Amino acid sequence: MATKLNVRKNVLHLTDDEKHELICAILKLKKKGIYNRYIAWHASAGRFHTPQGADRNAAHMGPAFLPWHREFLRRFEEDLQTVAPGISLPYWDWAADARLPDPRQSPLWAEDLMGGSGNPENHFVVEDGPFTQEHWETIDEDGNPDGGLRRNLGGSERASTLPTVRDVKEALKVDIYDSPPWNMTSEPSFRNQLEGFINGPQLHNRVHGWVGGHMGFVPIAPNDPVFFLHHANVDRIWAIWQIIHKKEPYLPQQKGPFGHNPTDPMYPWDTVPEEVMNHRKMGYLYDTEAKLLKTKKK
């Protein structure tokens, strides 16, 4: 076990220096060509159906959705640390932003963090903040240049609002991790509830749709750096669920679709789900965990 755990903080609680460090680290990974590896991994996992022809893939619509993205974030955080030692990946608490009169005015979208929505007169390309086309060129599913980063915050008819605190609390009440047929129809299923297919789009899926642009097209959604902050929050909610329902196992335990059982490798890596069940053993925890753990001990 790691001797010192990295603490993943709410992105809105970062100091000015921490925000600058985060943005600089992301831009450095992009310049080195490392960042695009994550877009390619995400796109290829989306094409790797489990099994072939099924309506689930290595990273979505199945039980491994949460462990796959936990491993994805761990690798990204470790790459960030190669250019900014000691940095931790923050999370975006979108349910808190849902309380704002206009979530598009959240400090998250300020010029010193993610930048704002795209210009509708320029194909919704982002024109402010650190990820303008001058510094940030996106790629398509085949790795070809795809122009500037696109966003359309709150512009989707199907996802015009962000998930709420109540939505998160309702998901956390589901005490079964997943259930047959292990896909987007599974219910009861905490995984499927959090992924957002039940009465969807909800939770994870709804956030992708609300941000829009590249985030709205899931295979290449990591083109938008807010992807990692979004999924850190999804991972944080899973971590909370694991504390609340600590006796509930990851499911399926066996005989599920390949790539989704505890000892199946999660394409495109050799890492298996059971290796990422304990995020603290992976070297990090969330700033919201300490209070929750104290409450559970009482």
Image (cartoon, helix red, strand yellow):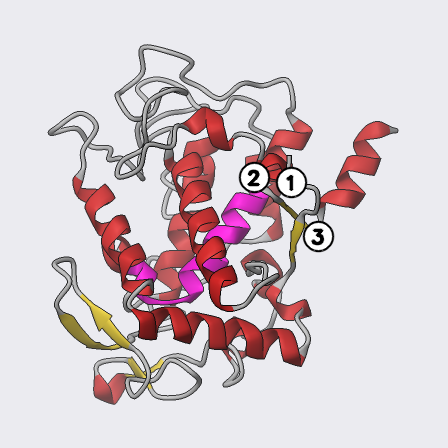
Pick whichever, 210 or 41, lies toward us. 41
The location of residue 72, given as percent across then percent down, is 40, 47
Q: Is residue 3 left or right of residue 147?
A: right
Q: Quadrant of residue 181?
A: top left
Task: Assign the N terminus to one quadrant of the image.
Answer: top right
Disc 2 residue type?
A: Met
Q: Is residue 151 visible?
A: no
The location of residue 11, given as percent across then percent down, is 60, 66
Query: Which numbered marker is on residue 256?
Result: none
Residue lying at 31% horizontally and 37% vertically, measured from the top left: 269
Look at mark 3 in the image and give the residue it sits on. Answer: 287
Whichever of callouts 1 and 2 sits on the residue coming sooner in the sequence is: 1
Whichever of callouts 1 and 3 sits on the residue coming sooner in the sequence is: 1
Residue lying at 64% horizontally and 25% vertically, measured from the top left: 245
Mark 1 touches mark 2? (CB < 8 Å): yes
Q: Is residue 174 visible?
A: yes
Query: Which numbered marker is on residue 2?
Result: 1
